[in-house]
Amino acid sequence: MTQDIALVLSSGGARGLAHIGAIEELENNGYRITSIAGCSMGALIGGVYAAGKLNEFRQWMKSIDRKRMLELTDFSFSINHLVKGTRIIEAIMEFVPDINIEELPIPYCAIATDWKNGREVVFSSGSLFKAIRASISLPSFYEPVKRDGMILIDGGVTNPIPLNRVARHDGDILVGVDVSGHDYKGQWEMEHELTERRKHSSSLSQKILNRLIPDDLEFNHYTMLSRVSSLMIRQNSILMAKLMKPDLLIDIQMARYGGFDYDKSEKLIAIGHQKTLQAIQKMKNAGK
């Protein structure tokens, strides 16, 4: 028996590629997505899915390596952003034509944030890719989107997993996929192990580097700000889940992959498959 679901996809940068695996696994298990809402990378994946082009997007992501990532990065070096963000959207639009959101076969919305007043902005009509571009505007990285007197930045700032914004239908269940969390303990353990290996290496070149590289190299201004931002977003997503109580919450925390590992798409998709299947089985077992 097919079960209708209202699906919500969180922010999370490249980790959001796990959303593809989650969607595929949900469908493999008899779930039918009848509405979708997303934030940031979740808005991109959700929009591509709603447009019926998820498989094409997955195949395209397979071609993305570090060299291709640089080609798609239109550096700006403005005072408020590093990357314009136009080139990546134009590349995706080559195989996912733009469409008005209200013309999509299923209800869809994307979340952004108005930098001026700090409020959440919900896009449920108008250009799909204008909505996606606003939603993915990572502060200080992508150029903010100026529209209707607003300065739009990443929706993850205000609502990283918009469980309260997805359209609902009679008989559906609410499903959220949250990739905003990190397995910080696992990440620290891996980094500690690598540091110890480096310290005890017998290589002469490595011994020289050991004298030049401080032990706490990973603990710097950038990593400090990045982690603080991630922790705040994660807490907001946890609070939203407690408030909305989804029928199924697929919580995908990662230790190995970060927000810019777009060249690891197949590995991230595989994680999405694995974690989604585990969550489905756990829900079914709890219902017995």
Image (spheres, helix red, strand yellow):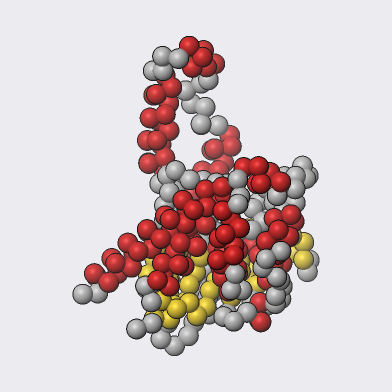
Horizontally, residue 267 falls left or right of residue 278, namely right
**Quarter the N terminus occupies:** bottom left
**Image mark count:** 0
Q: Is residue 99 above or below residue 252?
A: below
Q: Position of residue 220 (x, y in %)?
A: 55, 32
Q: Can residue 99 be spotted in the picture?
A: yes
Q: Is residue 270 above or below residue 184?
A: below
Q: What residue appears at the point 68 percent right and 43 percent down from the top-left corner?
A: 70
Q: Between residue 115 and residue 34, name the one nearer to us.
A: 34
Quadrant location of residue 59? bottom right
Q: Position of residue 281 (x, y in %)?
A: 29, 67
Q: What residue appears at the point 40 percent right and 35 percent down from the top-left corner?
A: 190
Q: What residue appears at the point 48 percent right and 11 percent down from the top-left corner?
A: 204
Q: Between residue 208 and residue 65, name the one nearer to us.
A: 65
Q: Can residue 131 be spotted in the picture?
A: no
Q: Is residue 94 above or below residue 65?
A: below
**Quarter the C terminus occupies:** bottom left
Horizontally, residue 197 falls left or right of residue 41, namely left
Q: Position of residue 8 (x, y in %)?
A: 49, 69
Q: Position of residue 284 (x, y in %)?
A: 27, 72
Farthest residue to the bottom: give it: 170
Quadrant location of residue 244? bottom left
Q: What residue appears at the point 37 percent right and 72 percent down from the top-left corner?
A: 29
Quadrant location of residue 30? bottom left
Q: Between residue 114 and residue 182, name the one nearer to us.
A: 182
Horizontally, residue 280 falls left or right of residue 175, namely left
